[in-house]
Image: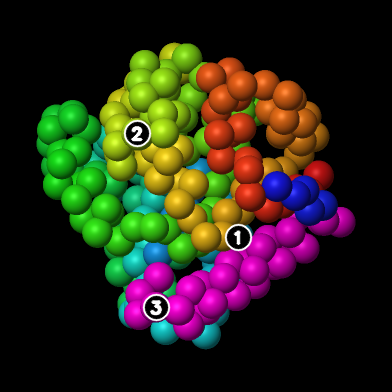
Amino acid sequence: MSLITYDSRDALMEALAEQIAHDLGAALARRDRATLCVPGGTTPGPVFDRLTQADLPWARVDVLLNDERWVPEDHDRSNTRLLRERLLTGKAAGAGYLPLYADAPRPEDALDDLSGAIEAQLPLDVLLLGMGGDMHTASLFPGADLLTEALAEDAPVLLPMRAPGAPEPRITLSARVLNTAAAKHIVITGDEKRAAYEAALTLPASEAPVAAVLPGAQVHWAA
């Protein structure tokens, strides 16, 4: 695990997009298809914007989310909606997409179908994660109902997740699957998240879930 600091957020986003494009190119040199797993939220948007201009054979790349809120894909809080607007466009419009949402009342109702499509593409090649001030990553939240199961060495590919403060059910990749990635990157900005990251270095994953994915990761930070 290493921490890389940048003089500005713009410099961070530019360098991180270049690194992810490089990692994808390296993965595609090893095998026919590559997987890129990314977060929702607003922080990675500038990285996505830059990646849409990357000269890659995007038709050989499959994109999937770290996690998703269980809301329709056109909902304001849908990570899928953000992904379609910010990443699966421009030169990246030809990329494949592995969904984390289906038209079902609960995430439990679609787990088998969604998991099967993702499992066929494992291990992940390139992973980008975010982190909250509470030290959650993906939908691995402190206090979440199935956090212990999601952190287990034999965890399934996907788990439904409900957590205090999360207004809707979630679906998330397990820590085991996130850790299959050949290249792992975590992007954080601001002093609050820098302090949270440093706290996570000393805490168990049950209290700081991001700690479960820190080994081998590059953490990218700018104020």
Residue 32 lies in the magenta stretch = yes
Residue positioned 45% across, 79% down in the render: 30
Please tell me which of labels 3 and 1 falls first in the chain. Answer: 3
Q: Which residue is more in the foreground, 163 or 180?
A: 180
The residue carrying mark 1 is: 46
Q: Looking at the image, which residue sits at the far front? A: 153
Tell me the chief SS of the magenta region. Answer: helix
The residue carrying mark 2 is: 155
At numbered mark 3, what does the secondary structure look like: helix, strand or loop?
loop
Question: Neighbour class for label 2 at 10 Å: few (<14), some, many (≥20)?
Answer: some
Give residue 143's position: percent from left, percent from top. Answer: 47, 14
Q: Which amino acid type is marked by label 2? A: Ala
Q: Which amino acid type is marked by label 3? A: Arg
Measured in 3D between alpha carbons, the distance from the residue under mark 3 to the one under mark 1, in whole angstroms, is: 28 Å
The residue carrying mark 3 is: 31
Give residue 205's position: percent from left, percent from top. Answer: 57, 25
Please tell me which of labels 1 and 2 falls first in the chain. Answer: 1
The answer to whether 132 is drawn above or below residue 54 in the figure is above
Magenta part of the protein: which range?
6-34
At numbered mark 1, what does the secondary structure look like: helix, strand or loop?
helix
At numbered mark 2, what does the secondary structure look like: helix, strand or loop?
loop
Would you say residue 76 is visible in this rendering? no
Question: Neighbour class for label 3 at 10 Å: few (<14), some, many (≥20)?
Answer: few
Is there a contact, CB below 8 Å, between mark 2 and mark 3?
A: no
